[in-house]
């Protein structure tokens, strides 16, 4: 290998080489997070020969390996389920003791007792009980894996996609690195579900990435789990002594970066999806390293404080730090369509709707998600789904949540399989047939759920601390 020093970036020149083709398939899904698992399962269930490639050894992405274990809302403010399909398939596989969330009969309830109970368990907001369970990471890895394999997709784990195989603007597959060396997978359609848009960036698609340093969705962190805690004791302290609670949390804040615990299905575990750090990029290896180091140091300071000061935490110990870096946002596709706040605030329903999102606040109707938001411009045989979708920053705040990523992945998987079956490019798939299949797979849409009814919040809708001016909660 030749080293080329000189002006600008120091480089080495690698020799050209022949790369073995590992497999050929119909649909290749790159990235086994929520979007990728849903895409692979949904393409395979339509008979497409499907491979799911993932750089780590498990599925679920940020929702398992990133310890983002609170699955955000899948019901609207009246309690109707607006995200289903793959979400149901995977959550139905969870053992009951691995899931903390309300029964469907109480979704939408404004009963004060139920609301008070579920508010402390991240399943009631704005005075309404919501379908937003917290799950055990290991069981969700297994649920994703079982669902993907049961639908007939095959898995390639521990493989990191590093290049696209392309003829001009036509994507023909990818090259990946693994312990077996550098190999290629060829495919009729590739779906980028890497979260970071690695594949569409390599393919030359247009994308954007804006950093708003003080906004939550640009912050990174390693999430962690503590065991040996007593969350009932913690909640009892919070309820019975609100002034004492406020005081101790203020002391924690003064002591350094801190976060509050979230409940887990088990009383002896607590989840921390922060503290979050601004000013870092998940596309920089130096920043990724810095956030790993900083997160662990801060966690050790935090656990010392919690053990000494917070009821319920005297015997806390670190039982896990997330193996995947907590990244909320990096590249966003500039797709054939872009979801914007103006559209969903106005209640726009798209002709190419592929699913719904609960609106971020009760002030707004259910949000229509268009197919075009997954389709790159000017690049053939490629779709993109998940937190890398084409949208504005405000819309990203809720569209990047786990249920939305499941839903976008499902639509991309169905579209890819239909494109291959009909011989039509992904941009031109028959939208009515796509919607029909998604409905068959229990994906709620405006045509099945109806429009959101006007909703009057039982509690005042206050400004959210974290992001824009909505309440609820964004992680
Ligand atoms: C700290 C934090 C807390 C959060 N909390 C919540 C929450 O409470 N509730 C909620 O609903 N959402 C939450 N989110 C958001 C949510 O977890 C993510 O936005 C969501 O998981 C994104 O899903 P995805 O499939 O698009 O991407 P990811 O989950 O990021 O999955 C992408 C997958 O692709 C793989 N991959 C990446 N690059 C390559 C490559 N080149 N080759 C092969 N594989 C690759 C990755 O290993 C990963 O498994 C949180 C996010 C963070 C960071």
Image (tube, rainbow, N blue to C red):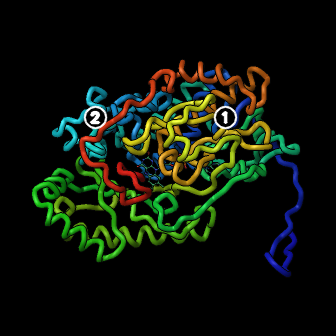
- Note whether 67 is above or below 37 in the view shown: below
Q: Position of residue 192 (x, y in %)?
A: 66, 43
For label 2, being within 8 Å of ligand 1 is answered no
Q: Which mark is residue 102?
A: 2
Q: Earlier in the sequence, mark 1 or mark 2?
A: 1
Residue 16 relative to residue 27: left or right:
right
Give the quarter of the image for residue 419: top right
> Which element carries disc 2, helix, strand or loop?
loop
Residue at x-position 83% and y-position 40%: 170
Residue at x-position 88% and y-position 61%: 15
Q: Is residue 180 visible?
A: no
- The outermost residue toward the left is 240
Residue at x-position 60% and y-position 34%: 39
Residue 293 relative to residue 11: left or right:
left
Q: Nearer the viewer, residue 378 or 60?
A: 378
Foreground tag (1 vs 2): 2
Circles 1 and 2, Cβ within 8 Å, touching? The answer is no
- Note whether 215 is above or below 52 in the view shown: below
- Note whether 354 is above or below 468 in the view shown: above
Give the quarter of the image for residue 73: top left
Q: Position of residue 157 (x, y in %)?
A: 61, 43
The residue labelled by disc 1 is 51
Q: Position of residue 470 (x, y in %)?
A: 39, 51
Q: Is residue 296 visible?
A: yes
Residue 56 relative to residue 238: left or right:
right
Q: Marks 1 and 2, Cα distance to the nearest angstrom?
A: 35 Å
> Which element carries disc 1, helix, strand or loop?
strand
Residue 46 relative to residue 162: left or right:
left
Q: Position of residue 82 (x, y in %)?
A: 44, 31
């Amino acid at each position: 290998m030749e080293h080329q020093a000189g002006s600008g970036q120091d480089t080495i020149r690698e020799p050209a080489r022949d790369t073995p083709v590992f497999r050929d398939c119909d649909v290749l899904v790159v990235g086994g997070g929520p979007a990728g698992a849903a895409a692979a399962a949904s393409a395979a269930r339509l008979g497409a020969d499907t491979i799911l490639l993932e750089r780590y050894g498990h599925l679920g992405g940020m929702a398992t390996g990133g310890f983002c274990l609170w699955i955000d809302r899948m019901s609207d403010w009246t309690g109707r389920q607006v995200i289903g399909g793959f979400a149901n398939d995977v959550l139905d596989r969870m053992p009951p003791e691995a899931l903390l969330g309300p029964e469907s009969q109480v979704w939408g309830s404004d009963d004060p007792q139920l609301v008070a109970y579920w508010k402390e368990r991240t399943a009631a907001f704005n005075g309404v009980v919501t379908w937003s369970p917290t799950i055990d990471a290991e069981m969700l890895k297994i649920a994703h894996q079982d669902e993907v394999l049961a639908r007939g997709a095959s898995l390639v784990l521990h493989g990191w996609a590093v290049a696209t195989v392309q003829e001009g603007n036509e994507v023909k597959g990818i090259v990946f690195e693994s312990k077996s060396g550098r190999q290629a997978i060829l495919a009729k359609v590739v779906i980028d579900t890497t979260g970071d848009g690695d594949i569409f960036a390599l393919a030359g698609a247009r994308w954007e990435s804006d950093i708003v340093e003080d906004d939550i969705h640009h912050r990174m962190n390693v999430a962690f789990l503590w065991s040996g805690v007593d969350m009932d004791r913690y909640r009892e302290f919070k309820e019975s002594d609100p002034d004492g609670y406020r005081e101790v949390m203020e002391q924690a804040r003064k002591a350094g970066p801190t976060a509050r615990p979230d409940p887990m299905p088990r009383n002896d575990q607590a989840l921390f999806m922060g503290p979050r750090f601004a000013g870092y990029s998940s596309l920089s290896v130096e920043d990724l390293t810095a956030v790993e180091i900083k997160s662990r140091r801060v966690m050790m300071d935090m656990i010392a404080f919690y053990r000494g000061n917070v009821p319920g935490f005297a015997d806390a110990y670190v039982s896990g730090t997330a193996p995947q870096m907590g990244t909320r946002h990096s590249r966003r596709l500039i797709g054939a369509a872009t979801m914007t706040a103006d559209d969903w605030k106005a209640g726009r329903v798209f002709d190419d709707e592929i699913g719904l999102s609960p609106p971020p606040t009760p002030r707004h109707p259910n949000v229509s998600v268009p197919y075009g938001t997954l389709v790159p411009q000017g690049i053939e045989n490629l779709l993109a789904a998940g937190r890398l979708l084409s949208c504005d920053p405000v819309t990203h705040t809720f569209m990047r949540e786990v249920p939305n990523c499941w839903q976008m992945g499902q639509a991309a998987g169905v579209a890819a399989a239909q494109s291959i079956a009909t011989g039509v490019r992904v941009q031109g798939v028959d939208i009515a047939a796509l919607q029909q299949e998604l409905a068959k797979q229990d994906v709620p849409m405006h045509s099945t759920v109806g429009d959101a009814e006007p909703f009057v919040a039982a509690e005042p809708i206050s400004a959210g601390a974290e992001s824009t001016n909505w309440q609820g909660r964004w992680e």
